[in-house]
């Protein structure tokens, strides 16, 4: 693990770039960033052009950045948060469900069954933001600069199903602690796999079903092995834009203000893109229309009232109690004051 991490960090540091002339208003600053999943639109359309083009242009050439997605650097998703915390990395776009095992509070705004849309997720994240920022700074030495998100996470399966109750007895790839609790409550067997490992696992029957965003799965060609897809949102996949706090505090205050302003705009654009991608992904996976490729012809499994009721039952009977057990009584109380209050849900 240490050898692989060292190689990945060395590879990132070796990325060469030529900094434009320094702006009259901002001191010359170079930044190294680790991005989210490189094959997906949040990285390609948002993170990559933001750091390699927008930041440099809007700073008048004073600020330059190099970025690579964590999966291309050989990192596991959960590692990235720890590497920012310990100062190995300066900045990163961290997929929070991947960190939920070690830092349960990081999943607070996106527990399975709490929110049903990107708009709801934005509301929950805004409610949690101030507490989350304080928590990360004090306990982990991490500066929270903003959020982003993937679109609604849905269920892909190799074989036919008509309800989420049919996941009983199936092996299901689940990312994040609350997804795993949800699958187990339904009678399935949760399997932890990196995103890049899911397609071959579906193809080889290592898993029967898997959860991810509809468009994400389309890009990764999950439809080549999974032929049925449910439109019911499980959760989403919140991203945090973070920096090592000690490194951040060493930046010029004008650079800090500039980056906070720019990342705030990035957050808005990410949520807007995510709000569009669920329907696009479902259309591309099924009968279309699909502007980015050939419709995959999967069978769409309609969401029923029974599915919604079962998801709510799983939330109250399994997801929230398990979250309280992982996170602790104080954490649960803070959740009730923030996310719970915003969404009308209470952990008992």
Image: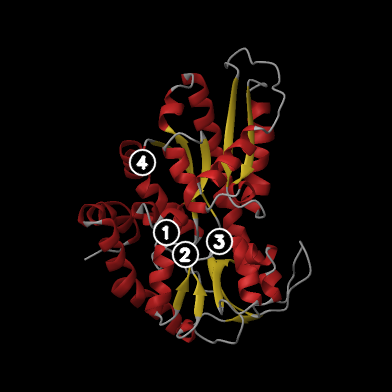
- Name the quadrant of the C terminus: bottom left
Marks 2 and 3 close (CB-CB < 8 Å): no
Quadrant in the rendering for residue 58: top right
Of badges 3 and 1, nearer the viewer stands 3
Q: Position of residue 168 (x, y in %)?
A: 45, 85
Q: Is residue 193 visible?
A: yes
Is residue 36 or residue 50 the one in the foreground?
Answer: 36
Q: Which residue is mark 1?
A: 110
Q: Is residue 63 above or below residue 296?
A: above
Marks 1 and 2 close (CB-CB < 8 Å): yes
Cα–Cα gap, marks 4 and 2? 22 Å
Q: Is residue 312 above or below residue 248?
A: below
Q: Position of residue 240 (x, y in %)?
A: 47, 46
Is residue 341 or residue 66 the one in the foreground?
Answer: 66
Q: Is residue 144 visible?
A: no
Q: Residue at x 30, y 67 (%)?
A: 322
| Among numbered discs 4 and 1, the one appearing first in the sequence | 1
Dot 2 crowding, Cα within 10 Å, few <14, some 14–19, many 20+:
many
Of badges 4 and 2, nearer the viewer stands 4
Q: Which residue is mark 4?
A: 136
Residue 5: image tag = none
Of badges 4 and 1, nearer the viewer stands 4
Q: Which residue is mark 3?
A: 194
Dot 1 crowding, Cα within 10 Å, few <14, some 14–19, many 20+:
many
Q: Position of residue 167 (x, y in %)?
A: 48, 82
Q: Which residue is mark 2?
A: 235
Q: Position of residue 81 (x, y in %)?
A: 45, 45
Marks 4 and 1 close (CB-CB < 8 Å): no
């Amino acid at each position: 693990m240490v050898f692989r991490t060292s190689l990945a960090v060395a590879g990132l540091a070796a990325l060469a770039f030529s900094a434009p002339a320094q702006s009259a208003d901002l001191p010359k600053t170079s930044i190294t960033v680790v991005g989210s999943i490189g094959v997906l639109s949040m990285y390609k359309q948002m993170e990559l052009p933001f750091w390699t083009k927008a930041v440099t242009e809007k700073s008048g050439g004073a600020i330059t950045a190099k970025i690579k997605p964590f999966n291309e650097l050989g990192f596991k998703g959960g590692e990235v948060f720890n590497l920012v915390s310990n100062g190995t990395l300066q900045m990163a776009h961290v997929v929070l469900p991947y960190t939920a095992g070690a830092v349960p509070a990081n999943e607070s705004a996106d527990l399975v069954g709490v929110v049903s849309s990107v708009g709801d997720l934005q509301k929950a994240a805004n409610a949690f933001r101030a507490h989350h920022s304080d928590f990360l700074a004090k306990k982990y030495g991490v500066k929270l600069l903003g959020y982003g998100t993937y679109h609604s996470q849905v269920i892909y399966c190799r074989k036919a199903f008509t309800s989420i109750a049919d996941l009983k007895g199936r092996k299901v790839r689940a990312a994040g602690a609350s997804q795993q609790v949800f699958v187990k409550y339904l009678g399935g067997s949760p399997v932890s796999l990196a995103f890049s490992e899911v397609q071959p696992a579906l193809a080889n029957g290592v898993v029967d079903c898997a959860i991810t965003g509809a468009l994400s799965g389309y890009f990764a060609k999950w439809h080549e092995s999974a032929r049925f897809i449910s439109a019911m949102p499980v959760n989403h996949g919140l991203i945090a834009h973070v920096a090592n706090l000690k490194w951040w505090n060493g930046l010029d205050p004008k650079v800090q203000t500039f980056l906070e302003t720019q990342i705030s705009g990035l957050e808005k654009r990410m949520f807007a893109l995510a709000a569009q991608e669920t329907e696009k992904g479902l259309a591309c996976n099924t009968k279309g229309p699909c502007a980015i490729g050939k419709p995959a012809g999967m069978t769409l499994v309609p969401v029923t009232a029974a599915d919604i009721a079962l998801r709510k039952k799983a939330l109250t009977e399994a997801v929230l109690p398990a979250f309280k057990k992982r996170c602790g009584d104080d954490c649960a109380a803070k959740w009730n004051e923030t996310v719970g209050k915003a969404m009308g849900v209470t952990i008992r």
